[in-house]
């Protein structure tokens, strides 16, 4: 039988550790290298959500599985803003055609451009360290 | 009141299963793809609103059966009413194509308010009830943890509403998957707490709910709830300490849980196994699914292997394996314990039980194999297009859909059986 006070102490200790860890993540934008992102990027994220792009597509491997990961679609050879705009307007395979307003299209493409600029989701671009961790190749 | 939550949850399970089977057919019939963006969230929400109301119903039941604490009429009715309003609103939102939310919560964010408010009612009821109970057994700790952390993580998953959090892409995605990881951990605490409650009923007095081992397991689970979500974001260019924390914590996962169930199972007498025929079997099934998903989770949490599995159907297999194999099996065990403990063993029940496990195994294996091929493709076949790779997965999708239909039919059978048992009780 456990002394009934111990669980309270351990619970409190873990909660304080968790809150500290959470806050360390919340304050990251305050000292991020890049400044505040343009408004079009933030609005682009909302367009992504409004049209539920995540149900089929992924960003950094997170999202649906019916379509490809779009993290680096902007910089992919032969693709880019015009290609993205054309695919959204006409649809392809299982993807239906979407009718986005001009500013929505602009915001969404800006969002994909900025997402692409912040890193690579291609697993081949990582190196595996001796401790099993993976790091983006420079 | 507990039975009303379980009843509502079973209805949502039926909706979630029908939507899931329909959505999965989009993998083989491209013409249906146009509906996928509505069907997928309807399926996901159906399953989430099976798990959460069922888990809270089990807590209401557990407090009443174990400690004679009757649910507060006002709070439990407010909880139920707010959730019914939210669920109706969410499905209307999906039907109208009014999205705007994120993964798991893709509906218009306005419907998050009744969910959070309803949960707050549940939490107040829970805290008021357990305040009267001296020397809490471990499952009370687990229920309290699940209640508190669900509310915290749910609120955290809406931080993106503030531009401050949305303006930095990497932090935004980090917080999104931090909150989603903890949300799953929170409902797992509610469900594993229920599993412990059931163990104490089935193995009357033979399982010490206040032992150091029981608490050690609980704290390990809590530790994982708080810090074991980093494996979602190994490829995200976030701070290394966040990724290393997730990596290290994930290696501690599940160990005590298996140990404690092993100890419990050894001590259950044959008579008790037959008296609690279905609850006992569903709990044992969840035990086996814990074992399979544990192995998978540990492998997926090693970053070097995660590069192959991340973003593939192996992740889907893991999500399905845990929500159906572990969560749903425990919740079915609870429903049968509360409503049908007196069911006598018979051949057809045994056939249905084993068929359910076989269908789930085929479903799980087909997704893992599809994921393995996708993982190999993304690491070494850049010349093959995404469409060609998806076409090569069609045989696995055929098995996935066929076994999914069989599994959904069998789960509908169990849901129907439970609803008829509830009717008899009334």
Image (cartoon, coloured by chain):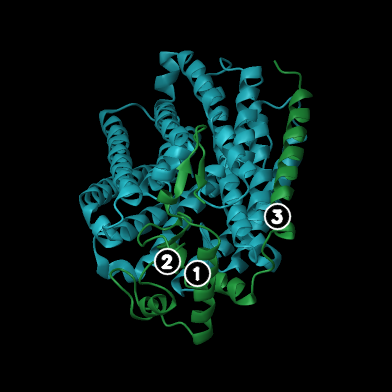
Chain colours: A green, B cyan
Q: Are marks 2 and 1 on the same chain?
A: yes
User: What residue sits 68% from the left and 32% below the top?
Assistant: B141
Q: Is residue A109 left or right of residue A85?
A: right
- Tell me if mark 3 has few (under 14), some (14-19) or many (20+) residues whose alpha carbon lies within 10 angstroms of its own: some
- Chain letter of the residue beneath label 3 in the structure image: A
- Chain letter of the residue beneath label 1 in the structure image: A
Residue B53 appears at what percent x and percent y? 55, 49
Is disc 1 placed on a helix, strand or loop? helix
Residue B39 appears at what percent x and percent y? 39, 63
Is disc 2 placed on a helix, strand or loop? loop
Q: CA distance from mark 2 to mark 3?
A: 26 Å
Q: Nearer the viewer, residue A27 or B278?
A: A27
Residue A101 appears at what percent x and percent y? 49, 85
Badge 2 or badge 1: first in the primary sequence: 2
- Tell me if mark 2 has few (under 14), some (14-19) or many (20+) residues whose alpha carbon lies within 10 angstroms of its own: some
Q: Which residue is mark 3?
A: A28
Q: Nearer the viewer, residue A98 or B424?
A: A98
Q: Are marks 3 and 1 on the same chain?
A: yes
Q: Which residue is mark 2?
A: A73
Badge 3 or badge 1: first in the primary sequence: 3
Could you tell me if the residues under marks 2 and 1 are in contact, i.e. CB atoms within 8 Å? yes
């Amino acid at each position: 039988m456990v002394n009934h006070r111990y669980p309270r102490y351990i619970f409190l200790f873990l909660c304080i550790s968790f809150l500290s860890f959470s806050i360390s993540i919340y304050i990251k934008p305050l000292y991020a290298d890049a400044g505040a992102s343009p408004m079009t990027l933030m609005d682009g994220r909302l367009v992504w959500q409004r049209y539920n792009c995540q149900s089929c597509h992924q960003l950094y491997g997170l999202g649906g599985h019916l379509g490809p990961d779009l993290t680096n679609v902007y910089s992919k050879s032969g693709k880019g803003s015009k290609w993205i705009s054309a695919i959204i307007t006409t649809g392809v395979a299982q993807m239906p055609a979407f009718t986005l307003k001009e500013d929505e299209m602009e915001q969404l493409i800006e969002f994909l451009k900025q997402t692409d600029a912040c890193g690579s989701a291609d697993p081949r671009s990582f190196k595996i360290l001796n401790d099993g961790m993976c790091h983006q190749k420079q | 009141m507990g039975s009303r939550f379980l009843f509502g949850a079973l209805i949502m399970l039926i909706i979630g299963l029908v939507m899931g089977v329909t959505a999965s057919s989009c993998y083989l019939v491209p013409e249906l793809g146009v509906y996928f963006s509505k069907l997928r969230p309807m399926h996901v929400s159906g399953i989430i609103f099976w798990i959460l109301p069922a888990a809270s119903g089990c807590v209401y039941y557990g407090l009443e059966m174990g400690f004679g604490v009757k649910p507060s009429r006002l709070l439990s009715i407010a909880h139920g009413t707010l959730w019914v309003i939210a669920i109706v609103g969410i499905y209307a939102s999906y039907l109208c194509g009014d999205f705007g939310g994120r993964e798991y919560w893709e509906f218009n964010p306005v419907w998050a308010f009744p969910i959070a408010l309803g949960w707050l009612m549940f939490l107040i009821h829970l805290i008021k009830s357990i305040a009267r109970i001296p020397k809490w057994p471990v499952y009370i700790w687990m229920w309290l943890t699940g209640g508190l952390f669900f509310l915290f993580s749910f609120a955290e998953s809406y931080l993106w509403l503030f531009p401050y959090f949305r303006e930095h892409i990497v932090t935004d995605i980090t917080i999104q998957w931090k909150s989603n990881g903890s949300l799953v951990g929170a409902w797992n605490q509610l469900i594993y707490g229920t599993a412990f409650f059931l163990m104490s009923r089935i193995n009357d007095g033979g399982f010490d709910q206040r032992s150091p081992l029981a608490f050690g397991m609980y704290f390990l689970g809590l530790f994982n709830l708080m810090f074991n979500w980093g494996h979602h974001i190994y490829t995200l260019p976030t701070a290394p300490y966040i990724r290393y924390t997730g990596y290290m914590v994930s290696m501690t996962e599940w160990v005590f849980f298996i140990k404690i169930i092993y100890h419990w199972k050894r001590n259950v007498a044959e008579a008790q196994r037959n008296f609690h025929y279905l609850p006992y079997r569903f709990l044992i099934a969840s035990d086996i699914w814990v074992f399979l998903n544990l192995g998978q989770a540990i492998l997926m949490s090693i970053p070097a292997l995660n590069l192959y599995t991340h973003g593939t159907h192996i992740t889907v297999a893991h999500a399905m394996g845990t929500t159906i194999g572990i969560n749903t099996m425990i919740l079915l065990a609870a429903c049968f314990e509360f409503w049908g403990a007196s069911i006598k063993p018979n051949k057809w029940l045994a056939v249905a039980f084993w068929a359910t496990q076989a269908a789930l195994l085929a479903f799980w294996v087909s997704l893992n194999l599809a994921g393995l091929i996708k993982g190999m493709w993304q690491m070494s076949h850049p010349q093959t297009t995404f469409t060609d790779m998806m076409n090569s997965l069609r045989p696995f999708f055929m098995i996935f859909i066929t076994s999914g239909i069989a599994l959904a039919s069998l789960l509908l059978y169990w849901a129907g059986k439970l609803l008829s048992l509830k009717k008899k009780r009334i």
